[in-house]
Image (cartoon, rainbow, N blue to C red):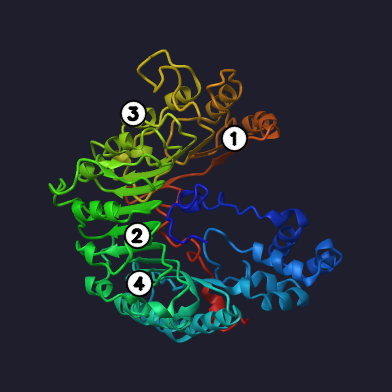
Amino acid sequence: MPLHDPYSSLEDAGFRPRFIAIHKFPVQEHGIMKLVEDVSNTGDIQTEIWNSARSPVNELPDDVLRDIFVCTLPTLHNAVISPNQPPLLLTRISRRWRTIAFETPGLWASIHLPAPVLSFDATRDDEKRILNVIMPGIERTAKEWLARSGDVPLNISLRINVDDPHSAIHSETSEILTNTFIHLSRRWRHVRIESVEDDCIEKILQVPAENAPLLESLEVDGGFLMGCSPEPKIYANASLLKTPNLRSLSLQLASDDVSDLPINRAHLTYLGVRAADDVSLDSLAFLFRECTNLKQFLIRMAFPATKKSLSENFPARIACPTLQHISVVDTDDDRADLYKRLELPNLCRLDFFRYPTMPCSILSLLPGTHGSITHLITNACATPFSEFVKWLKLCPNLETLSLVQGPFQLFAEDVTRLPITLLDMLSKKSEDQDSTHDGSYLCPNLRRFECFNSTDFTARQVLQFIKTKQAQADPRIAKLTDIIVCFEAEQKESKEVEAELTPFRSDGLHVSLVYCLRTQQYGVHKSFVPTAGLQDSYTDGFDLGVFGGTLSL
C-alpha cells in the first residue's frame, strides 16, 4: 500500500470530503461488508448477529473468510485502532469471526499509531491522564496488535500532533509510540513518521540498513509549514536510507546540501521533498537530474526561494524521461526558472497547488510536457479564471480535471469563484478560434470532472453540462464517466435535479452532487474539503476512551 502520495486519490481522499471517500470492497456482493456495517450501526449487536446467523457468509470455509477479511482493510491509510473499523470490528461479530480474525496475521500487518490530541483548554491533569492512562493503553494495544501479525511485512504510520499547545508531552508520546515497533525493523515494508521528535526520528533512521531488508518506502514529515524539519545531521548519519530495496523516499529537509544524503538515487522511483526552510533551485535541479528512474516527484515548499535562478552549470533543458507524476505545492513564482527547464515527455498526472500570487509558474512547467497530461489536479480558485483557461489549453489530452482547495487555507479575498462559463467551455464548441487548443473544444477527452472549489454553478447548470456532454455526436468529444460537484448549501431544485439524473446513472455515469454548508471563522473560509491530506483525518475525532483499559485484544 503506497503511503507516500499525499494526494493518492482522487482516487485518494486527500482533498475530498470525508464522506465521499467510500471504500468499495469487491466482497460487498457476498454480503460481508453489509453484515459488518449493519452490526456496527446497531445498538443491539446480539440481536443483529442472531438474525444474521443463517447468512450465506457464515457457510464459507475459514480460509475463504480469512481472505475476505483482509479485503475489508482500508486501502487509503493504515488500519486504525478503532473498535468500529476493521480489523477490530471483525472481532466483535461472533466467536468464530473473532477466532479467525486473531489467526489471520495479514489483518494486523498495518497500523496507524495515534497520539492523543489535547484541546486548547486542557489542564495539567489532562496531560497527566494522557501519559499515565491513555498512552499505556495505546502502547499495550499496539504491542498486542503487532504480535498477532506473525512474520508478515509491516506497514506502520505514526503521527504526533505538533499543532497543539501541549508540546511538553510530545517527547514522551513520541518515545512511547516509537518503542512499540522499533524492534521489528526486519519486517518493515512501509514506514511513515510525521511530526515526531528528532530523537525518535534519529533512532529510526540509525537502524542499520541490513536490519531493514524489506523496507520499500520511508516518509519523514516534520509537519508542513510548521518549521519542524529534522536537524541535517540526522540525515547525514541515517544508515536506514541505504537499505537496498528502498524505492520510495520522502523527507522533510532543513538543509540545502541534498547531495550528501546517503541514498542510492538511481534506485528511487518516488521522491518527496518537503522544505520548511529554503532548499535552493540548484538542489531541486540536482535531484531531478540525478534520480534517473523517478516516476513520481513531490515538491512542497513552505517559503519563497532566496535565489530565483539556477546556476550556470545546469543546462537549458533537464530531461526527466521516466517521470509520470509530479506534485508541486509552492508559495509563489520564485521557482519558475526550474520548472520551465524540465523536459517531461511522459508526464501523465500533474498536481499543482500554490498560494494565490501572480504570475503562476505552472505556465512555465506545462509546455515541457508536450501535452501529455491526462490528469490535472489543482486549486483553480487561487488563480484568475483567464489564467486557468490557459492551463487547460496546454492540456489537450486531459481526461481528469479535479479542482480542489489543496493545502492552503484561502482567505476570502484570495478566492476566485469559478464561473458557469467553465462548464460551457468544457462542453460546447467554441466560436473563438483562439480560446481552445484546436479551435473547437476545450479538453475534448475529459471524462472525469471533480469540483470542490467555490463556484457559481447551480445544480441545474451542472445537469445541463452533463446533458450537453452526454448528447454530443461529435466523435472528438468524450462522454463523462464520473462527475462530483460540491455546493456550499442545499439548493431549491436539488430533488428535481436528482430525479433527472436517474437515466444518466442507469447508463453508467457515476454522478454525485453534494450539498454542504461552509462557515467562516477567523476570516478563513473553512471548507468542507480537507486542507491538504496533511491532517490526520483517521485519528481526528478518535474515541480515546478505548485506551483507558477497556479495550482488549
Q: Secondary structure at mark 4?
A: helix
Query: Depth-wise, is mark 1 or mark 4 nearer the camera?
Result: 4
Front one among 498 and 477? 477
- Residue 312 in the image, given as x and y percentages of width and height: 12, 47
Q: Residue at x 45, y 87 (%)?
A: 132
Query: Depth-wise, is mark 2 or mark 1 nearer the camera?
Result: 2
- Residue 438 in the image, given as x and y percentages of width and height: 41, 20
Disc on the earlier residue, 2 or 4: 4
Q: Amino acid at mark 1?
A: Thr
Q: Residues within 10 Å of mark 3 (few under 14, many from 20)?
A: some
> Where does label 1 land, which residue?
481
Indicate left or right for 199 with 7 as reference: left
Label 2 – label 4 distance at C-alpha:
12 Å
Name the quarter where the C terminus is drawn: bottom right
Mark yes or no: residue 297 visible: yes
Front one among 407 and 143? 143
- Residue 422 in the image, given as x and y percentages of width and height: 43, 27
Relative to 514, is 547 above or below? below
Label 2 – label 3 distance at C-alpha:
35 Å
Disc on the earlier residue, 1 or 4: 4
Label 3 – label 4 distance at C-alpha:
43 Å
Q: Quarter-wise, where is residue 222 in the image?
A: bottom left
Q: Secondary structure at mark 2?
A: helix
Mark yes or no: residue 126 visible: no
Disc on the earlier residue, 2 or 3: 2
Q: Quarter-wise, where is residue 39 in the image?
A: bottom right
Front one among 263 and 154? 263
Q: Which mark is on residue 266?
A: 2
Disc on the earlier residue, 2 or 1: 2
> Where does label 3 land, which residue?
390
Q: Secondary structure at mark 1?
A: loop
